Amino acid sequence: MTDAQLAAHLAKVAGRILSEVRGAGVFAGKALGKAGDQTANQFLVHAIREQRPDDGLLSEEEKDNFERLAHSRVWIIDPVDGTREFGEGRSDWAVHVGLAIDGVASVGAVGLPGLGLVLCSDVAQPLPPAPQRPRMLVSRTRPAREALAVAKAIGADLVEMGSAGAKAMAVLRGEAEIYLHTGGQFEWDSCAPVAVAAAHGLHVSRVDGSPLVYNQPDTYMPDLLICRPEWAAQVIALAASC
């Protein structure tokens, strides 16, 4: 099984597990989110260590083991990206299984269990046609000031959505053209989505256009831009002036 096949398989199975946890009706709200995080994390961590024992591992739900810094290959996972949305019974949450190689998000799978989809870096498809008026994805609860300013400058319609993975895949699926985030994230929020987005021909970078670098001692990542290539230069220039 290739790395991409493994990532896709794990994202699919973890999504099925999470759907069963939510469907059981035992938990609700924050307790449901916590149960989902813990259950999916246990499966993903065990499976990766079993299938790729020589690789490093970084998970949102595990205490960071800096031993990963000695590895060129590091799996970076988020068992439930969008825990709030998962707990609220929404569909805009995701499962992230990514692999960074020498700091680059190289392989990834993003499961969207609420939509019955798994999008992977090894199954690239042409981007769908874009409308004349762009759409920009922003957080449901805390839209970034810079994103709002750029959207106003280019006349973009705002699309509110939950998890980072759901937003990134919405660009890939043709539901929006730009995902600009400046509110801060961590490596597990973007590694898998960035790998999938890049494989499908989307632009991926920091908001200033510099590369996204993974498997760092400090896993905090201040900002992120995933968009259709034709919008990248304009968005980067406008963001710099905000």
Image (cartoon, rainbow, N blue to C red):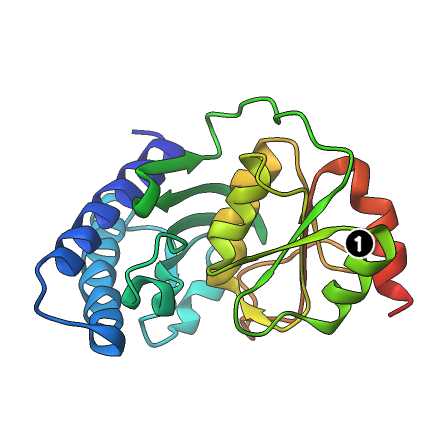
Q: Residue at x 80, y 36 (%)?
A: 230
Q: Quadrant of the N terminus?
A: top left
On the image, the x and y values in percent for residue 197 come to 58, 40
Asked whether residue 19 is in view, the answer is yes
Instruction: Tell me the kind of residue under disc 1.
Output: Gly
Between residues 74 and 5, which one lies in front from this camera angle?
A: 5
Image height of 88 relative to 20, above or below:
below
On the image, the x and y values in percent for residue 210 come to 77, 56
Mark 1, secondary structure of its residue: loop
Image height of 5 relative to 221, above or below:
above
Question: In the picture, residue 79 is in which quadrant?
Answer: bottom left
Q: Quadrant of the C terminus?
A: bottom right
Question: In the picture, residue 220 is in which quadrant?
Answer: bottom right
Q: Residue at x 41, y 54 (%)?
A: 92
Disc 1 target residue: 209
On the image, the x and y values in percent for residue 236 come to 83, 55
Q: Residue at x 55, y 48 (%)?
A: 168
Q: Is residue 184 left or right of residue 62?
A: right
